[in-house]
Image (tube, helix red, strand yellow):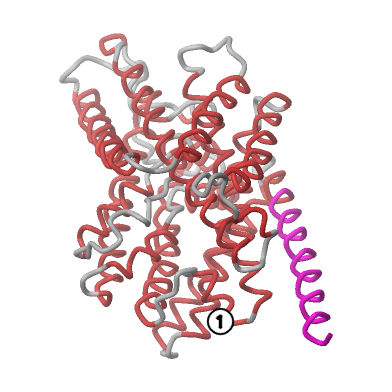
Amino acid sequence: MGKSSTGRQKDQKLKWWQLSLLGIAGTIGTGYFLGSGLAISIGGPAVLIAYFFAAVGTYVVFDALSRMTADHPEQGSFRSYAQKAFGNWAGFGSGWVYWFSELLINGSQLTALSIFSRFWFPEVPMWIFAAGFGILGLVIVFLGNKGFDRIENVLAIIKMAAIVMFLVLAVALLAGWIGRGKYNPKLPIHYKDFFPTGGIGLWSSFIFAFYAYGGIEVLGIMSNRLQQPKEAPKAGKVMLITLVVVYMLSIGLAVSMVPIRVFNPQESPFVLALSSDHLAFVPHLFNGVLIIAGFSTMTASLYAETSMMITLAQEGDAPTLFSRKWKGKYPLFALSLISVGLIAAIVMSLLLPGKVYEYITTAAGLMLLYNWCFILLSSGKLLEPSRSSNIKRWIGLWLIAMAVVGSFFHKLSRPGVYISFLLVLLVAISDFIVQWVRQKHMKA
């Protein structure tokens, strides 16, 4: 999962295809490179169905947000729309749910980077890698994003090149052009091969398919930079069609090259698929690219999280301390709070090294979907009602609900559900207290 910087060249207007490319580069991250392995291990090759329907739900959310952005440009985007549609409580809730989702996404990405690093250093504890990547990411955000945007563009190209490299090498291995892979290829054409864990397994994997499309809300914000804002839905369609093709081709090749029993949450399915005595260097090369790509999305995610915390503090939905900048330009206080969350992820890596990725990724995906519900419900209030938009909105809400409920049915994802519920309860209680205090002040 990844994010694109929204502050890049603010005055430059984009063509619809440029927005599509930014979306593709910004969305593909550790949720795809590692999270797909978790999805496959739970649902088998049938996860291809989950990725398709998750794309449908994601498009509905993007379509709603981009149309709201075109009709009512707002600096706070989805948070401002929730506030306008339902009141101050919704603005507070949407902002904090998004902030917590980003915090969990950081933890998920941090864990994924640690897992990739252990491919080379299996004896080193995960928490050491997590701490190293976390500190480096915080330092980069602390020093500011000058020059980092250009690096992000280069890293996006590297990321796309890695996917193309995987597709070409996978086809070459299957065709026998460059020798055999480690495993004998087998197309999952029979029912039991395609649905090894049945319908419940497919349902349980749905949340991880959605997680691979995370970041769409950032593209909704960027749609106000289009030369023709009405072309935002077209940009979203092209972006998601491209992602669906990339995801389904690459995952389809992976499940044809590796037995289902071999997939696990601790290894990228694409590194597994490229394992071959004739290509011993390729998994190492691909793993290095995964670390570079994962670190870029983690750092961009830290930027988004820092920006949201400063906005919340400036608008009275968080202590004003977190909006202050040390020496006028360093977001020290906001990053200090974020550091606490990252430390929690590192401690979990120490205490639960075998399960932390599954737990944090599930919770991150669910918090993201809760915020998408805010977006869809807000669009029902703010956009002109039409039969097609109502149908799309309810389809999106139904697909999101399916993903949330499906998370209960697997032991690897169930703890993440409880973590997300606990955070939502914390936000709800804080929201109630803040609104009650505000009303008392207004009456006074």
Residue at screen point 29% across, 40% down? 156
Instruction: Identify the image quadrant of the N terminus.
Output: top left
Residue at screen point 38% across, 24% down? 271
Q: Is 122 drawn above or below residue 308 in the view shown? A: above
Residue 6 lies, in percent from the top left, at 37, 56
Residue 54 lies, in percent from the top left, at 45, 57
- Badge 1 amino acid: Lys
Give the number of callouts.
1
Q: Is 186 drawn above or below residue 231 in the view shown? A: above
Could you tell whether 173 is left or right of 341 in the image? left
Residue 421 painted magenta: yes
Could you tell whether 127 is left or right of 142 in the image? right
Nearer to us in this view, 121 or 56: 121
Residue at screen point 80% across, 80% down? 441
Nearer to us in this view, 293 or 206: 293
Instruction: Identify the image quadrant of the C terminus.
Output: bottom right
Q: Which residues are magenta?
A: 419-444
Residue at screen point 21% across, 71% down? 227
The residue identified by callout 1 is 84
* Dominant secondary structure, magenta: helix
